[in-house]
Image (cartoon, rainbow, N blue to C red):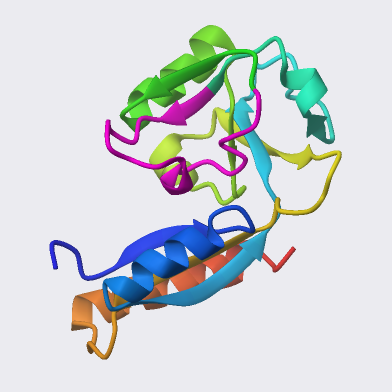
């Protein structure tokens, strides 16, 4: 109970493994939204004017991902398609480093496309990711809580604000 709420995504690749961990820890997943993956990059990136971006176009640019620690499983990666074969991969452990690498190295990451300009600024964008094989690339984003636990007023407000933000800014894709 270090945290009252956790935010995560499920996909075909990680659903069974994470579901098993949730069940064994008496946690439950609450659906918020489903979405397709997006390529997240800075507005000056050479691919920033594309309508969609596929793996082939990304092969000359570094894929950025968050470091998950020595004992972490790839099922816990924050980025979808984390086991794909990338030409270049750089691990970062904080948002500022990730954003600097996007600009300095024309790096990118794959994400949900849900971006908050208030946190990251307006110099970044999300472009729909084009996959050759559509299976397994949808993300189901939700939050987890302990089973049978009533959220605190702050926790409930957080969930309400998140649902409001998602409802206003993103339709189910």
Dominant secondary structure of the magenta stretch?
loop
In the rendered image of this protein, does residue 101 appear above or below residue 117?
above
In the rendered image of this protein, does residue 137 appear above or below residue 60?
below
Residue depicted at 78% across the width and 53% down the height: 135
Please say whether residue 150 is one of the residues in the magenta stretch.
no
Tell me the quarter of the picture where residue 149 sits. Answer: bottom left
Please say whether residue 71 is one of the residues in the magenta stretch.
yes
Q: Residue furthest left?
A: 2
Q: Nearer the viewer, residue 164 or 74?
A: 74
Residue 131 picture location, percent across and down = 81, 40
In the rendered image of this protein, does residue 154 appear above or below residue 43?
below
Q: Quadrant of the N terminus?
A: bottom left
Residue depicted at 86% across the width and 39% down the height: 132
Q: Nearer the viewer, residue 89 or 118?
A: 89
Q: Is residue 77 left or right of residue 129?
A: left
Residue depicted at 60% across the width and 58% down the height: 11
In the rendered image of this protein, does residue 34 appear above or below residue 87?
below
Tell me the quarter of the picture where residue 45 sits. Answer: top right
Q: Quadrant of the C terminus?
A: bottom right
Q: Is residue 155 left or right of residue 42?
A: left
Residue 81 picture location, percent across and down = 62, 40
Residue 122 picture location, percent across and down = 53, 34
Q: Nearer the viewer, residue 164 or 155?
A: 155
Q: Is residue 171 left or right of residue 68?
A: right
Residue 53 picture location, percent across and down = 79, 31
Tell me the quarter of the picture where residue 140 sits. Answer: bottom right
Q: Nearer the viewer, residue 1 or 103?
A: 1
> Disc count in the image?
0
Q: What residue span does the magenta drawing correspond to? A: 64-85
């Amino acid at each position: 109970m270090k945290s009252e709420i956790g935010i995560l995504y499920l996909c075909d690749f990680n659903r069974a493994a994470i579901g098993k961990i949730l069940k064994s820890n008496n946690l439950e997943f609450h659906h918020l939204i489903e979405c397709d993956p997006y390529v997240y990059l800075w507005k000056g990136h050479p691919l920033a004017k594309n309508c969609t971006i596929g793996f082939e176009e990304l092969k000359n640019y570094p894929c950025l991902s968050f470091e998950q620690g020595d004992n972490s499983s790839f099922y816990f990666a924050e980025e979808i398609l984390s086991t794909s074969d990338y030409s270049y991969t750089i691990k970062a452990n904080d948002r500022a480093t990730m954003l600097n690498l996007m600009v300095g190295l024309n790096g990118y990451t794959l994400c949900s496309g849900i971006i908050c300009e208030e946190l990251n600024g307006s110099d970044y964008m999300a472009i729909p990711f084009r996959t050759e094989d559509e299976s397994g690339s949808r993300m189901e984003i939700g939050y987890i809580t302990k089973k049978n636990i009533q959220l605190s007023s702050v926790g409930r407000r957080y969930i309400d604000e998140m649902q409001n933000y998602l409802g206003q800014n993103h339709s189910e894709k």
